[in-house]
Amino acid sequence: MMSHLLSFRKLTALLCCGALLTVSGCSSEPVITEQIQQTEISLSWWGNDARNKYTIQAVEKFEELHPEIKVKCSYSEWSGYETRNRIQMISDTEADVMQINYGWLEQYSSDGEGYYDIYNLNAMDISQFTEDYLRYGLKEGHLNAIPIAMNAQTVYINKTIYDSYGLDVPQTWDDLFHAAEVMKQDDIYPLSAASKAMWLYLITYAEQATGKTFIDSTTGKLNFNAHDLKVMIEFYQRLVAEHVMPQVDFYQRLELDNETYAGSVAWISDAVNYFGDAISHGREIVAADYTTMDGNNIGEGWYAKPATMYAVSKNTAHPEESAILLNYLMNSTEMAELQGIEKGIPLSTSAQEVLKKENILNGIQYEASQKMEGCTLGELNPVLETSSMIDTFFTICNDVIYDVKDIDTASQELYASVKSYFK
């Protein structure tokens, strides 16, 4: 009889401690709790370590607020993310909620069917965004994505370096060439840019020099001819030859930290990533005025686009749970406080109110955003960010720089290639 009693007690103890989903604690009088049925959804984004850290923290807070939803995170740096996203979109294996690039709307959803229509997601409060901002995510009447913030290429200057040479922050192209004459004795470049930023910067110059826009705003067709593209090639040659900016093939972002670059052209959303180290070491970094010709106001400003966007997979099995997460990422106090202005000034009214209250709307990214708002030419056409077109441009530029081709032949070849992207 005693052995049966001991066996019963062991069984009771095992049931008490093992059934964790339904029993709380292992006391002699177990408390039965309600079992939570979880739905798992996935979230993907790209970014540096700082972005990864605060996004994971935000997800943890989200799961505390919504214990019925489990979020599986997937993230990487930009190039890896872009490659993986392309494979996932083709194979219909993308995340339920995903950070996307503005140009992907045209690439994957030209008919508006490539992503979930957010208009049909009740849990997403789109009233926090103006119609002007929402239109960036519209494709054929479907709200495919919502922009987090706006972005533009910006000229950032390490004023501390310029001051050491007795130079003012450059405003014109001539100012940059003058700075190069002074700085090259110490092998310092007045400015720098990675390939995409350099390409867009050269377009800015050529538009000012020719008085023409690269793309016809009415038809969306290429407005430049071979001669206009020749202007871009020649100016790039001159920038490199006269030590104003390094050749993009040899550009190294870390040289900003080493202070062999006295500035850089970069997105608003990259300001802290590019200059956080310099700022932490007491350097004065400023968002300069947009570079113009002497006394020429043509093209005084830059084209803007959504810095980044969030979309929901058209294949999601859990649209409402995805919408709850999307709304949290865009509008919640928790996400606004953690993200700050790392991705730019948030477009969500509720997120902006949080940042105003916390006095977070300041710093170099905020300064750059203010510059953008005062000098925006219009929307940046996504075609201008086509990687293969940009790569072709610099390959042809190198052919000219290294005397493989004469500039007239190269310009005609470039024109034929660029024109093929505007059918």
Image (cartoon, rainbow, N blue to C red):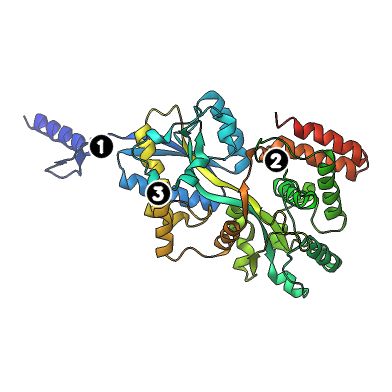
Residue 74 visible within the image? no
Locate residue 189: give its quadrant.
bottom right
Residue 161 x/y as whole percent: 73, 70
| Residue denoted by label 1 | 36
Camera-side residue of 339 and 303? 303
Image point (76%, 50%), residue name: 211
Q: Quadrant of the N terminus?
A: top left
Earlier-in-chain disc, 1 versus 2: 1
Residue 109 sits above or below residue 405 on the image:
above
Check disc 3 and report its element: helix, strand or loop: helix
- Amino acid type of the residue tagged 3 in the rendering: Gln
Residue 341's spot in the image, x, y percent?
51, 57
Q: Dot 2, how many residues are within 10 Å of its Cα: few (below 14), some (14-19), or many (20+)?
A: some
How far apart, in angstroms, are the residues tagged by discs 3 and 2?
Answer: 32 Å
Residue bearing the label numbered 3: 128
Residue type, numbered disc 1: Ile
Give residue 215's mark.
Answer: 2
